[in-house]
Amino acid sequence: MNQEKVLIVEDELHALTGLAELVSGWGYRTETARDGVEGLEKALAWQPGIIVADLKMPRMDGLELLERLSELKQNQAVVVLTAQGSIQSAVDAMKLGAYDFIQKPVDSVRLRQILSNAARQRETEQELEVTRRKLRDAGVLGLMVGSSKKMQEVFALIERIAPSNVSVLITGESGTGKELVARTLHSLSPRKARPFVAVNCAAIPETLIESEIFGHEKGAFTGAMERRAGCFELAEEGTLLLDEIGEMPIGTQAKLLRVIEERTLRRLGSKIESPVDVRVLAATNKDPAVAVSDGHLRADLFYRLNVFNIHMPPLREHKEDIPAIVEAMIQDMNQKHDRQITGVSGEMLQQLMASDWPGNVRELRNTIERAVVLGGEGLLEARHLPPGFGKSSGKPVEAVVPENAVHIEIGSTIDHAERLLILKTLESHGNNKTRAAETLGISLKTLHNKLKEYGSSTTDNGSENTDEP
C-alpha cells in the first residue's frame, strides 16, 4: 500500500468524489478541496506529497494555486486537470512548475501511472539533495563536469527540471554535449531505471523515419516483413531524445506533435492507438527560431518542446573547465582501453588550454582518447597530441584539413569554395560521411544533399551511424 498523501482540488463535486475514491483505492491517503483557496490552505496544513488540481475553478484557479505554492516554497508534485482543447493552459502550468497534466475525462490508467511516477520523483529528489551537497563543490553533476559559471548555470537548470516530466529543448553547437545533458536529465529523474533512447533524426532516411520513431505492423509497406516497435515503444516509461529535430520531415513533425500532446501512439499500418508514457527531449545545433522561420521546424512543435531550453556553451567559452574535463576523460579512457595514464604534463595542458576547440568537447575527447592510447601509462606529454595540433587557429579555411590543404583562389565563388572544402574534408576522412559532417559542423542529411548536388560518386568506408573516430 502506498502511503503517499494526495490532495485533490476540484470544484465539481461528482468529479471530486470519484477521483478521491479512485486514488484511495490505489492505496494513497487522500484529502479533498473544492477550490484553489481551500486547496492552498490544506496543502500548507496537511503537507501532501502530490496535488491533483483542476485548472478552471472559482476563487483561485489552478494556475494561481501553482504560483502561490511556488512563492511559499512548497515542493509538492502538482498534476493539473485540463479540458479538451486546453493544451496551452497545461503547458503554461508546466512552465510554472507543474509535474504533469492529464485531460478530462480522466484516463484512470494514465492517472495511476502519473501518481506512481510523482511518488518516485519525491524519493529521487531526496537522493538528489544528498548528491548535490557531495558533488556541487567538485563541479560534477551526474555525467557532466564543470565548475565554471556557465556550466554551473546549466547544472542549476538541470537540477530544477530533471525530476519533472516537462519537455526540454537542448541547443548548442555540434560536440558541446547535448546528448550528455539529455542522459543527465534522465539519470536524475524518476525514470532513471527505465530506458533512455536516443535517435538522430538526420541519420535516418526520410522514407524510414516514421517507422523508426512510431514503429510498424507487418505488411505496412514494402519490406515490412514483421512487426517492429518504434523508438517511443522502446523508451516506454523512460526518456526519448530526438537529436537534430530540425532535420525531421515536416509531415513526421505533425505526427510527433500529436503523440506528444495526446500521449497515444499508432504504429504504421495499425488501426489501434496505444497509450505511451515517455518523456520527450529534443536537441538541435541550429538556432530553433531560424529553423521555424525557414520552415524546417513546425512552430507548434517548437513551442511544445521548448517548455524549457538548456543551451550548452561552446568549450571556448568555459576553458577553465578543461583540466577537470580532461581528468574525467582520462579515467574513462583508462578503463575503456586498459591504460594507466596518471595525468597530463604542464606543457600539454597549456596547449589544450590555448586551443579554440571548434569541435568542442567531442573534439577534446577524441584528442584525449588518441593520447591515452598512444601514451599507455604515466603522464601524457605534448608529443602525444595530433601532428599540427594548435596550429590551425586563425588560419584560412584550407587549414581545416592540414594533410590535404584546400587551395582557394581569390575571386572564387562561395559555392566553389564550399564544394572544395566539403570534398576535401570527406577525402581526409576516408569518405566517412559521419565524421566529415562532424568536422564541417553540418548534419549528415545536409552533407548527403550537398554531395547529391555535386553529383559525387564517393562511397563510405565507415558506418554513417557511428561517432567513433
Image (cartoon, rainbow, N blue to C red):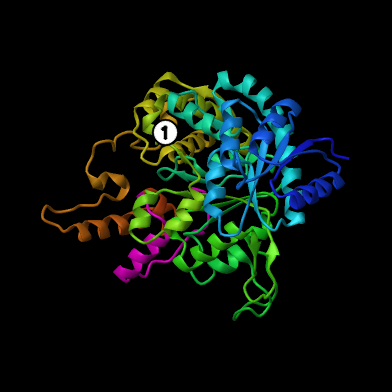
Q: Where is residue 76 in the image (x, y as percent from the top left)?
A: 68, 33
Give the left or right position of residue 37, taking residue 361 as reference: right
Q: Where, by quadrant of the figure, is residue 318 drawn? A: top left
Residue stretch in magenta: 440-469
Outermost residue toward the right in this view: 1
**On the rendered structure, is 388 left or right of 235?**
left
Q: Which amino acid does label 1 sit on?
A: Leu
Q: Mark 1 points at which residue?
A: 385
**Is 319 placed above or below 465 here?**
above
Front-most of residues 448 and 273? 273
- 221 shown above or below 24: below
Q: How crowded is mark 1: few (under 14 residues within 10 Å), some or many (20 or more)?
A: many
**x and y percent of residue 403 in the render?**
32, 47
Residue 157 in sight in this render: yes
Q: Is residue 151 left or right of residue 35?
A: left
Image position, residue 130 (x, y; %): 68, 23
Secondary structure, magenta segment, majority class: loop
Q: Position of residue 242 (x, y in %)?
A: 53, 54
Is residue 467 found inside the magenta-colored segment of the image?
Answer: yes
> What residue is drawn where x is 52% and y is 45%?
92
**Residue at 42% in and 23% down:** 320
* Along the line of sight, the residue nearer the viewer: 399 or 208: 208
The front one of 101 and 358 is 101
